[in-house]
Amino acid sequence: MRIAVLDDYQDAVRGLSCFKLLDGHEVKVFNHSIRGQGQLALRLAPFDAVVLIRERTAFPAALLAKLPNLKLISQTGKVSGHIDVAAATGHGIAIAEGIGSPVAPSELTWALIMAASRKIVPYATNLKEGLWQTASTNPVLNGIGRSLRGRTLAIWGYGKIGRLVAGYARAFGMRVLVWGSESSRQAAVADGFEAADSREALFAQADVLTVHLRLSDATRGAVTAEDLARMKPDALFVNTSRAELVAEGALEQGLRAGRPGYAALDVFASEPLRADSPLLRIPTVLATPHLGYVEQDSYEIYFQAAFENVVRFAEGEAENVLNPEVLGKG
């Protein structure tokens, strides 16, 4: 098969142990993204299969209609709204889903919480400029960091990642407050944590609030400007899940108004994030370039499953296909 691997920004895929699974196939790894659908269609026209790195490239109906040779989309992890499944099915394109791990994004969440709380990045950056124990040359921003013990970590969403983050908070002596579905709140209580009395209480009581929800029509824009306005002026808002969980413009508005006081973000509505993004100009924002799953062990897990799905499809033994009705057609 002719196989394209898209959006490998760091040219990491070819160095993975699992890459050898594609031996015998014609493989092209693309390190640079194309946003225009016309250009993308030209790039992908020769390929029988594409391997996607999460949601870095969207496959809407208009693009799928321009790819008559495409037979398989192999997804690292699960499909999350970036592929028009109905359109793919209509064109006889199979979509194979893979697996993932909550470990790396959970650890990154905790790393961001600690880094933002102790102001590690500005301290380290200023030290290289000869500034000792200086978080900012702006006196208003040059406050000292703070520890986590005894403070309240609020978690909205108690799935695999939320559960791990709660465990880290427990180890650091934090109070953990959880909001989400009724079953999520019950699970949190069963694990020895607290369920918030209300969504309003979750935001109002948080010293640190982190969001761990799946993006869907129901959760898009779930965090509103009103929610953020309830946060303390020294609270930290953390998002390593999906930028679209927050209403458009609400976080920028809240940070400029001083509630919450700080944000630590790994996800953005448009990625790669432009250097002139307004978020990067807010000095109380710690931003990382969507590193949640970008880690050696996670890549091996994601890509081994995705490549195995490609190989099995090529051998006529397709597995993990989201739309099995296309199999055997064409």
Image: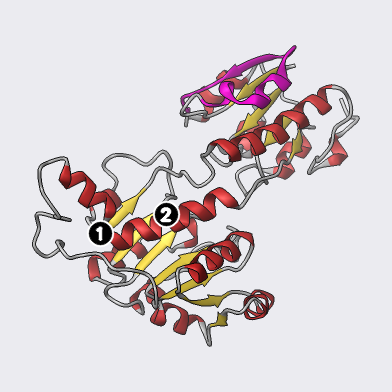
Q: Sequence-wise, which precedes: disc 2 or disc 1?
A: 2
The residue segment tinted magenta is: 12-33
Residue 110: give x, y in percent of width and height. 45, 58
Q: Amino acid at mark 2?
A: Ala
**Front-most of residues 252 and 140:** 140
> Residue 326's quadrant in the figure?
top right
Q: Is residue 272 above or below residue 38?
A: below
Instruction: Using residue 132 as the reference point, say whether residue 316 is left or right of it.
Output: right
Q: Is residue 206 above or below residue 141?
A: below
Q: Amino acid at mark 1?
A: Thr
Instruction: Using residue 46 as the reference point, say whether residue 283 is left or right of it.
Output: left
> Residue 161's quadrant in the figure?
bottom right
Residue 204: give x, y in percent of width and height. 39, 81
Question: Which residue lies at the image location 16% right of the left edge and 40% below the top edge?
Answer: 128
Q: Which residue is mark 1?
A: 284
> Residue 60's quadrant in the figure?
top right
Q: Which residue is mark 2?
A: 111
Residue 76: give x, y in percent of width and height. 65, 38
**Badge 2 vs badge 1, beta-carbon distance below 8 Å:** no
Residue 49, numbered label? none
Question: Which residue lies at the image location 48% right of the left edge and 57% below the top edge?
Answer: 244
